[in-house]
Amino acid sequence: MTVQEWLGVDNKLGIDIFNKKYRFENETFDEWLDRVSNGNEEVKTLILEKKFLFGGRILSNRGLDKKGVKTTLSNCYVIAPPEDNIESIFECATKLARTYSYGGGCGIDISKLAPRGAKVRNTAKETSGSVSFMDLYSLVTGLIGQNGRRGALMISLACDHPDIEEFIEIKSDLERVTKANISIRITDKFMEAVKKNEDFVLSFTREETNDTITKTINARELFHKICEMNWDYAEPGMLFWDRIENWNMLSNDSNFKYAGTNPCAEEPLPAGGSCLLGSINLAEFVTEDKKFDYDGFVVAVDIAVTALNEVLDEGLELHPLQEQRDSVRDWRQIGLGIFGLADMLIKMNIKYGSEESIALCDKIGFTMADTAIYTSAAIAAYNGVYPKYNSTAIETSEYLRANVTNSTYREVKMNGLNNSQLLTIAPTGSLSSMLGVSGGIEPIFANYYTRKTESLHGHDEYYKVYTPIVEKYMKEHNITDDTLLPDFFVTAQDLDYKNRIEMQAVWQKHIDASISSTVNVPNSFTVEETEDLYMTAWKSGLKGVTIFRDGCKRTGILTTSETKADESEQAHELKRGEIIATDDNIIGLKRKLMTGCGSLHCQAFFDQNNGELREIYLSKGSTGGCNNFMIGLSRMISAAARAGVSLDDIVDQLMSTGACPSYAKRGKSKGSCCPMAIGYALKDMHKQFNEYFMQGSFIAEVTKNTEESEVNIEKKSKILCPNCGEELVFEGGCNSCKACGWSKCDL
C-alpha cells in the first residue's frame, strides 16, 4: 500500500503531514507501518482502518533507536519541582535542556520557590522571588532546538503562593516568558472563597530561615484578575488541583503525588513522569445505519492499551534522565484518548452539546474506561502489576468504582493493574489534520476556511476550503451553500460555552488523567462571562481549562491587526548589540516564491507604528539542508531588523549574493538565488504595507468564486502559521494549521 491509497489521493494535506512529520527518510508506507506497529498485525489493521494512531513521537520515532537516533517515544515529561535553593533551581534548567534535546516537552511547578522579599542568608539578603526564575526556564526552552522547532514548557504555581499576583500578570509583558505556557493550581478552598466573596490568605514558610511571608487578598478580586488576564492574553490557564488529585486511580495512595502537568495540561504526572500517547478515531466507529459500533470500539481499546504497554517497555531506556526512567518503570502511565468526536456526531446526525450527544458520550466514555482497566488487569495477570502497586488504594478508588462493571472490578481485585494511569485526551492537531477529522473532544472549528491564491492580475483572490466532513456532506446531499447545512453542524464559533463545558465534563467523568482543553469564544465575550465560564468549569468537575478569545493579545507577533494604534511610539535609539522585542503592533504579509529547489514561503512582519521590519519567517516546501539554511537566515534577518538595521541595508546585503546553479535552471521568482528572491519579496511587501496599511485599508474585502458568488473575508485579528502563513486555529489547547498541518503541540 502507498500513503496515497491510505489517506486518499485528494488528501494532499494529510500526505504532506505524513511525509514531513512521520516518515523517516525515504522509507515506503509499508516500511513505516511495519516500523510503527513493530510487526503487530492487529495494530497495523487499526492504523490502516484509521481507527487508531499512536501519538506523534511514536509515529515518527519508534524503532529509530535501532538506527542510532537519540530520541524518546514520549511526548512530554514533568520535571521534579525545583527546591528552594540555587543548586536545585539551575539543576532543573539542566534537566529541561537535556529533555528538550531528546524531543520531549516539559512541565515544572515552581511553588516550592520562595516569594519575592523572603530573607536569605547571602549577600542578596532577600530573594528575587519564584517568578524571576521563569525567565531562566523560558530562555532554556527557546535555546534548545528540536528539528527546527523550539521546546514546549508549562510552568505552574499554587494559588496560595505570595507571588501569585506577579505570576498572573507576567504574560502582560510581551518581552518575558515567551517560550512557556503558564497555569495556576486552583484549590477548592480558593474557589469557595470566591463564591462567598471572602478573604484568602497567601502564605509561604521558608524552611532554611523559618521566615513566613503572608498576604491577605480578596479571593473574588484575585479571581477577577485571573479571568481578566485570560480574556486579554489567554493565560494563565486554570488547573483545578483538588479535582486532579482526587479523581484518579491513585487518589488513595499516600505514596503517590502529582508534581505538575505536561505543556498542554492533559497529563498530570509525578516527578519524572511521561505521557505516552495514542488516540482512537471515534468517527470510524459509526455504522452505515448511523449507530455507534461498541463491539468494534471495545476491540480497538483493548488492542491500543496492549500496544501502548509494548511501546512503554521498548522505550524504558530511551528516556533522557534517570528520574524519568525510574518514574515510568515504577508507575507505568499511558495515555489513551480519542479524536474525531465532532465528525462522529455529524455522521450520526446528532448536535454537539445536545442532551443526546452528552448521553452518547457518557456511554462511550464509560465503555472506554471499563475496557482499558480490564485490559490493564489482564496484562497484569501475566506481566505483573506496576512496581508501586497498592491494592488497597486502587480497590477503594472512587474513580475506579465509578468507571468499571462488576466483572472488571473482580478482574482488578484478582490480578491488579499493569498501569497506574490509562486515559487522557490530548490535542491531536497533526493527527486529526492528517486524517481530515476533528481534534480531541472539540467541535469542528469552522465549516470552512479562507485561502488566498497567487494572482497574475495584481490583486489577492480568496476562496473557500470546506472542512472535510462538511464538504463530504454537502456533496452527498447536493448542497452548494453552507448556510443551508442542518443544525447538527455546530462549530466552535457558534457553540454556547456552557454546552462546551458540559461536553468536557462528561468525558472527564471517565478520564483518569485530564483533557487538553481550550474554549474558543468570540471577541465580544466579556470578562464577566469569562468568570462565569471558569466558575461553571469548576462546578462541573473539570480538571483544567483555558479560553481563547478571538482577537486577544495572545496573538502577539503573529497578529494581523485590522486597526492601527492610536499613537505611534517613538523609536528609542538602540545601543550597539541591543535587540528590541516585538509586540502586538505587528502587521504580517507573505509571499510564495518559486526557487530552484521548489517553493519558498516568506512572511514579513512590520511595525504598524513606523513601518519598520521586525520579523521574517522563511520555510522551504521541503526538509533538509536548504530548509535549515532558510531557518537560520530568517533568524539572522530578524535579529538584524530588531537591532535597528534598516530594510534597505538588509536588502542590499541579500542582493549582493551570487547566482545559484539550481536557481538558474528552475527558479521563477526575481533574482538569481534564494537570498536575492527574498530581497525582492521584502521590498515588494514593504511597498504593499505602505500603500495599503498606512492608508488605513490593509485588509481589503475581495471576492472570488468560480460560480461568481461573493466570499467575504472577515476583518479580524489572525494568528498566522509560521510554516505556511495561513491562519491558525486554537483548539484543544494548541495552535494548529488547517492548511499545512503544522501544530505547536506537534502530536
Image (cartoon, rainbow, N blue to C red):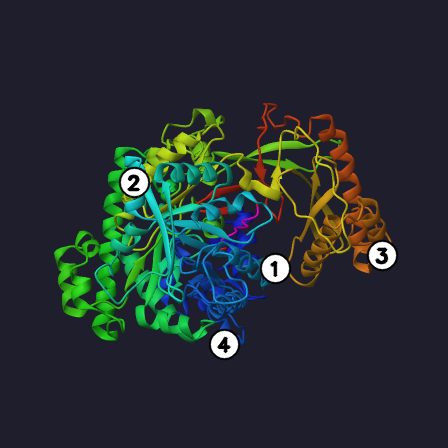
Q: Nearer the viewer, residue 209 or 428?
A: 209
Segment colored magenta: 740-745
Crowding at label 3, few (<14), some or many (≥20) Cα neighbours within 10 Å?
some
Q: Is residue 742 magenta?
A: yes
Left or right: 196 in relation to 690: left
Q: Which image quadrant is residue 286 in?
A: top left
Q: Mark 4 points at which residue?
A: 66
Q: Which of marks 2 and 1 is nearer the N terminus?
A: 1
Q: Earlier in the sequence, mark 3 or mark 2?
A: 2
Please tell me whether mark 2 sits on a helix, a strand or a loop: helix
User: Which of the two discs, 2 and 1, sits closer to the camera?
Assistant: 2
Residue 631: x and y, percent? 68, 56
Q: Mark 2 points at which residue?
A: 193
Q: Is residue 352 visible?
A: no
**Separation of marks 3 and 4 at Cα, in angstroms:** 42 Å
Q: In the image, what residue type sits under mark 3?
A: Thr
